[in-house]
Image (cartoon, rainbow, N blue to C red):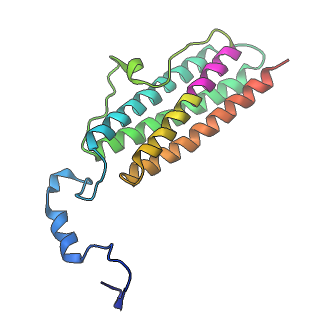
Amino acid sequence: MHINGTENSGPSVLTDIATLRARARQNVEEGAVTIGYGAHRETIIKLLNEALATELVCVLRYKRHYFMAKGISSESVKAEFLQHAKEEMAHADRIAKRITELGGEPDFSPDGLSSRSHAEYVPGDSLVSMIKEDLIAERIAIESYREMVAFLANNDPTTQRMIKEILAMEEEHADDMASLLEGMKV
C-alpha cells in the first residue's frame, strides 16, 4: 500500500481509492450509513429513541421543578433547573439528529414516553425532594449512557462519541445536583 507516495510495510488496513469510490456509490440512499457501519442499525435506533425519551422526560421534570420551586433558596436552584432543562433539550436534539442520520425516525410521541424513558418523572413536593429526584435521574442517565458507550464499542464511533459527550454533561449535572443537595443540609 502506498501512502503519500511512500511504501507502507505495515498491515493493509486502508481501502484503496477505487474501492472507496465504488462503495460510496452503492446504496447511496442510505446517506451517512456506509458499508463499513458495524452496528446493527435498528438496535442502535431503538437505544437512541430510549435515550431521546429519557432526555425529554428530564426536560419536563426540570421545567416543572423550575416553575414549582419555592422558598428562601429557590432562586439559585431555579436557575440551575432551567439551565439543565435547556441542556437536556440540546441532548434530545442531538440524539434525534443522529437517529435521522442512521435512517431512523425520532420518536417524540407523548404516548408511552415515560415507559420508553430510563429515568422516571417524579414531580417532588419540596425543593429538597426535587433536587433528589433530579440527582437520581442523572445517575440513571449516567449508568445508561455508560452501558451504551460499552455496547457501541468500535461499531459506531460517531454515536459513541456523541453519547460520551452527553455522558460528560450528565455527570456535571449530577455533580451540580449533589452540590445543591449538600447546600440544603442544615
On-image quarter of the N terminus: bottom left
Instruction: Report the magenta stretch's main SS.
Output: helix
Q: Is residue 136 magenta?
A: yes
- The residue located at (42%, 50%) in the rendering is 153
Q: Is residue 118 magenta?
A: no
User: Is the residue 21 above or below the residue 130 in the image?
Assistant: below
- The residue located at (36%, 51%) in the rendering is 156
Residue range of the region highlighted in magenta in the rendering = 127-138
- The residue located at (61%, 13%) in the rendering is 68
Question: For residue 12, which quarter of the picture?
Answer: bottom left
* Residue 65 on image: x %, y %: 60, 18
Question: For residue 126, which quarter of the picture?
Answer: top right
Residue at the far top in the pictured view: 125
183 sits to left or right of 60:
right
Number of marks in the rendered image: 0
* Residue 66 on image: x %, y %: 60, 21
Q: Nearer the viewer, residue 9 or 164?
A: 9
User: Is the residue 47 above or below the residue 155 in the image?
Assistant: above
Residue at the far right in the pictured view: 186
User: Is the residue 70 above or below the residue 104 in the image?
Assistant: above
On-image quarter of the C terminus: top right
- The residue located at (50%, 26%) in the rendering is 59
